[in-house]
Image (cartoon, helix red, strand yellow):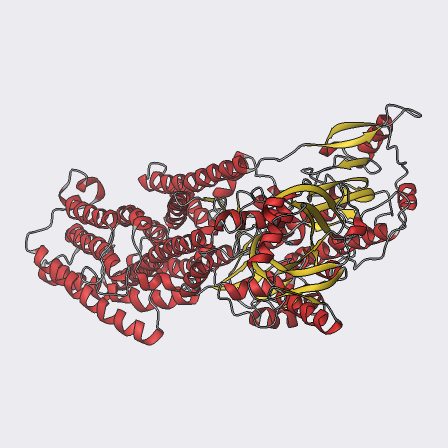
Amino acid sequence: MTMLTPRTPTKLAPPGRTRRERRAAELEAGTRRVAERLAAVAARPVVRVLQDVDTSREGLTHAEAALRLELHGPNAVDRERAPRWFAQLAKAYCNPFIGVLVFLAAVMFWQDPADPGVVILGVMVGVSGLLRFWQEYRSGRAADALQRLVTTTCAVQRRVGSGAAPTTFEVPMDRVVPGDMVRLAAGDIVPADLRLVTAKDLMVAQAALSGESLPVAKADTRPDDLGREGSGDPVEADNLCLMGTSVTSGTATGVVVATGADTWFGSMAGSLVGERPQTNFDNGVRRVSFLLIRFMLVMVPVVFMVNGFTKGDWNEAFLFGVAVAVGLTPEMLPMVVSANLARGAVAMSRRKVVVKRLNAIQNLGAMDVLCTDKTGTLTEDRIVLDRYLDVHGAEDGEVLEYGYLNAHFQTGLRNLMDQAVIDRVDEAEEVVVDARFSMVDEIPFDFARRRMSVVLSRNALAAGAGPAEHVVITKGAVEEVLALCTHLRDRGETVELDERLRDRVTRVAEDHNRQGLRVLAVATRTVDAPRDTYTVADEDGLTLVGFLAFLDPPKASAAAALRGLADKGITVKVVTGDNELVAARVCADVGIEVGHVVSGGEVDGLDDTALRALAARTSVFAKVNPVQKARIVRALQAEGHTVGFLGDGINDAAALRDADVGVSVDTAVDIAKESADIILLEKDLTVLEQGVVQGRTTFGNTIKYIKMTASSNFGNVFSVLVASAFIPFQPMLAIMLLVQNLVYDISQLATPWDRMDEEYLRKPRNWDAKGILRFMVTIGPISSIFDIAMFAIMWNVFAANSEAHQALFQSGWFVEGLLSQTLIVHMIRTRKIPFVQSRASWPVMVMTVLAVLTGLWLPFSPLAPSLGFVALPASYFPWLVGVLLAYCTLTQFVKTRYIRRFGTWL
């Protein structure tokens, strides 16, 4: 918490917004308030800031720190916690179908406590919930194991008591309070938001907050610093260090101005607690569930009334109506969905993917837009020397040699670009440092000069006869080095650097900057009067040799992975905090059509409607902050897209949570992993592409079960209505309906292990409640045609046309109904010709055979009398085969017409 200004009350969002929109508006307002507060801190003199937080350069006393800790609380941000196991278990049973089944079981128990249907329904409910609970609980524990803190303490300057000398103590990060003086050195994580009091050569890695791949330089600061106005973005302030960033080089002391939820980091973390937004999967399951429940609520009363009026036995009609309700309810849907998702999670774990939330697997398959950061996903997340160029922009080995000598002989801490030069030479073996040179002196890098120099002795062996020469080799920012040059090297000749040539070489550097490269200049001069020590004044009269150009190179696999995602119908949009030029260069290199690069400033200038249109046609967003990233995700969702987001930084956390599927990596910051639904153990789009295929397979097998069961159940109810209206007895006993349903549903437990046709996996797949209804009313009645045909056969051929022979009628229809339901699975599971063009997996084949054998065995089994069955005559089976063949033939014909008409099947 901060002591700078009183809190501003949160303004309520306008009425009429959804909860998600209100929460997003509150997050944006909170982040804006923190940004304004930090901008004010950056603009104030150090002395004023110390007064504001009631501290001094010596730091707080232990007693003062304890009081402030009690007042402001621990220096910790809000973060999402995994629910306790019993809460997860209860949530696993929060499903509309499970509610229906529990209600039906209660009704059946009320009617007859000994009814075996109660046990059957209880087993279905129990197994379904437990399967879902165990997989999510296990995945949550695996994800927790990936979260490990890099450091837990920081160096804080405090005093034992008033008047005592300040001493540096290692203090747990969560015990840091406003007013503490924190000391920073290379390798330290910044524990809170700090205003720099002193700083020397400070470089800070801010990628987790900004997406900037290279460390950024902070201003050398003195205790009399007067502050400076900034852009309003705290990340860009050169006299602030923000919580969650880390020091790569240099030293500093800073005063804590904000802790916990009041930090820039904390303002983003506040969006990550509370109820998660509804995803594509949640909305799809809800729509389909209530479609089927509404259908059941219409059909069951009709069956009840028809049976009651035609048979006159209302009690029996009620029991039959309950059995029909069970038959109409895809009671195994929660279990099949859970089994599908669990199997998908296991399969993905073998591909180095941890699934934290099972629903995310289907969302991954439905994803048609992937928003991704650039660094580490499209690029290798390391700096390499891409080019070494002369003053005309042509490759020149002399430039590489001088750049290498500068990097090799410096004694200070090498930065990433120095190491990149050395690595390039080591790989190519293009320069060999031998007895030709020896170290004389160096002029270290500082942030005011933005360059460093080494002075080498060109030994007599290398220089020929005569005394050894001293050579100054300078490397640094182009404008700084160029200002010190009086000559340049042009094709082996030293030429005076006039204004015309100066403009030309400046354009060469700028052209490469526009290509997204980080460019440094290399210059040299031979010293006329060699000596032992050198100063900044000796960096003068230099001869420009050329330029070194660096970049974070694209991954070798990135372009192929992007083509693979495009082939799967997924559009990739890059959303990065890095600058526009770098983002455009990398995207072009990996094959993304860049077009106009939209900046975060442009996003802020648009309302939600305009942003939706812009987001739909834009491929690359650069220099965007966390709030803008989340807005872009929501804008794409508002256009009807299922959006995935891949990121690993603090600045990605809000977008990860808002996306339909948030994907992070095991090396990400903890808060990003907590916000994600899926964690990759390898930051590679190829791994993600495999996850997409698994997600579509999972969804395809789920939708198979729904369409097969819904259409079959609809046909059965239609058949029951016809039979109830014209047959003087129950066409099938309630217990027979339950057994038939149970055998069929058990056979469908193999559905998660089925394979999907390659054509199905090429496009994103989504829930379509209207499509399921259309499928149900088109395919369902086909079974009724052959059910009625079997009624006629049993009535006329086998004389099962009176109550005395109703058991024969019921047994005959039971077998035909069960076998037709089971065999038709193979007709519906593919749009191709079954068994010829597409075959089911062996688990599905085995379960089909077992279900068929069970159906044929039951009328002859010892269980037959208790279930109401009688043995069927041998002459029944040729008729059964004929009906089933006719059923399959007609279904294949209707399937072909259906695909031609609607262009889809599953």
Residue 171 at x, y percent in the picture:
74, 29
Residue lying furthest front: 465
Task: Check the image and name the residue furthest to the bottom.
Answer: 901
Tell me which residue sits at (29%, 66%) in the image.
779
* Residue 566, percent from left and from top: 44, 65
Left or right relative to 739: residue 141: right
Q: Is residue 78 visible?
A: no
Considering depth in this image, is 752 or 552 the residue closer to the camera?
552
Question: Which picture quadrant has residue 670?
Answer: top right
The residue at 54%/64% (across/down) is 587
Horizontal relation, residue 222 to residue 474: left or right = right
* Front residue of this view, candidates 653 and 92: 653
Q: Hey, which quadrant is residue 703 in on the image?
A: bottom left
State the image coordinates of residue 676 (x, y, percent, origin top left): 55, 48
> What quarter of the picture does the C terminus occupy?
bottom left
Q: Is residue 639 visible?
A: yes
**Residue placed furthest toward the left:** 875
Q: Is residue 486 above or below residue 896?
A: above
Position of residue 882 relative to residue 458, above or below, is: below
Q: Nearer the viewer, residue 342 or 127?
A: 342
Could you tell me which residue is drawn at 33 percent across and 57 percent down?
704
Whether residue 427 sits left or right of residue 81 in the image: it is left
Position of the N terminus, as image quadrant, is top right
Where on the picture, by quarter, is residue 389?
bottom right
Q: Is residue 609 left or right of residue 46?
A: left
Total residue callouts? 0
